[in-house]
Amino acid sequence: MNFRNRQIACLAGLLLALPVAADQTLIGADGREILLKDDGTWDYVSNSIFVDTREGQRVELKPDGSWSYVGLAPVQEETQYRELAIEVAVASADIEEYVSKVGATKNTRKESFTNFYLDVLVASSADAPVDLKALKPEQFSISDNKKKSYPVIEINSDIDQLEPGKSTRLHVKTKGAPGGLIRTRFINVVIQPEAFNTEQAIELEIEYEALDISRKRK
C-alpha cells in the first residue's frame, strides 16, 4: 500500500471513530492541512506543507518554494494551552493565609486566597490585540479534584492591551484555598473561549504540591 492509500485508510478510520460535529482542520502526516467536513467527507485545504519549529512557531512551506510564519504551533498540556494566535501557560501559583484575632479573646479567624500567575503570549501573526481590561471573573472557573470551587475576585495585568508578538503575566486571584482533611491533588483552571477569543475553552491543571503556601498574621 503506497503512502497516499495509507493516508486515505487512516483518515477513513479517523472519520469513522470520531463524531464530527463541525468542520475541523487538521495537519496530515505529510504536513498538509486537511479539512474534515461535517458531512463525513474530507479534502486538502491547500498544497502548502506545515511544519513546527523547536521554538513553537508554525511555518507554511509554499509550493513556490517560499515560506512564512503563520502562528504558534498548537499544544495542549496540563499547564499550557496554545493555538495559532495565542498561548496561555501557568507560570506559578501560591496560597496566602491570614490569621487574625477575634476581639479580645484567644479565638482566631483564618482567611485564605489562591493566586494564579498565567503567562499570555499573542502570536505576531494575530489579527488583533487582546483587550486584557475586558477580562471578567466569570470567564474563569477554578475548582479542585474534590469539586470545590473558588470564586475569582481579581484579574490584574501591568498592561491593558496585549499587542501581537508580545507577552504579559496575568494575575488571577480567588477567594479560598484548597486543603482540609481530604488531600487535595490538583486544581483546575478553565478559561472560557470569549476571554481570549480561542477556538475552545482553555483547561489547565496545577498540582497542589506545586503551590507555595505563605502564612501571615494581621
Image (tube, helix red, strand yellow):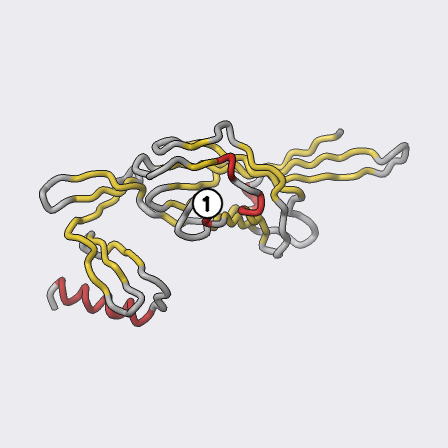
* Residue at x 11% of width, y 65% of height: 2
Question: Residue 112 or 23: which is nearer the viewer?
Answer: 23
Label 1 sits on residue: 79
Q: Quadrant of the C terminus?
A: top right
With respect to residue 197, does 119 lie above or below?
A: above
With respect to residue 210, does 11 lie above or below?
A: below
Q: Quadrant of the N terminus?
A: bottom left
Toward the bottom, the furthest residue is 16
* Residue at x 66% of width, y 42% of height: 175
With respect to residue 20, does 200 lie above or below?
A: above
Q: Residues within 10 Å of mark 1 (few under 14, many from 20)?
A: some
Q: Position of residue 128 (x, y in %)?
A: 36, 37
Q: Is residue 65 left or right of residue 20?
A: left
Toward the right, the furthest residue is 104
Residue 21 placement: quadrant: bottom left
Residue 12 placement: quadrant: bottom left
Residue 126 visible from this viewpoint: yes
Q: Is residue 205 left or right of residue 100?
A: left
Q: Position of residue 209 (x, y in %)?
A: 56, 44
Q: Is residue 192 left or right of residue 29?
A: right
* Residue at x 15% of width, y 52% of height: 47
Tally of numbered discs: 1
Residue 94 visible from this viewpoint: no
Q: Position of residue 186 (x, y in %)?
A: 56, 50
Q: Secondary structure at mark 1?
A: loop
Q: Is residue 66 left or right of residue 20?
A: left
Question: Residue 203 or 158: which is nearer the viewer?
Answer: 158
User: Hey, what amino acid is under mark 1?
Assistant: Thr
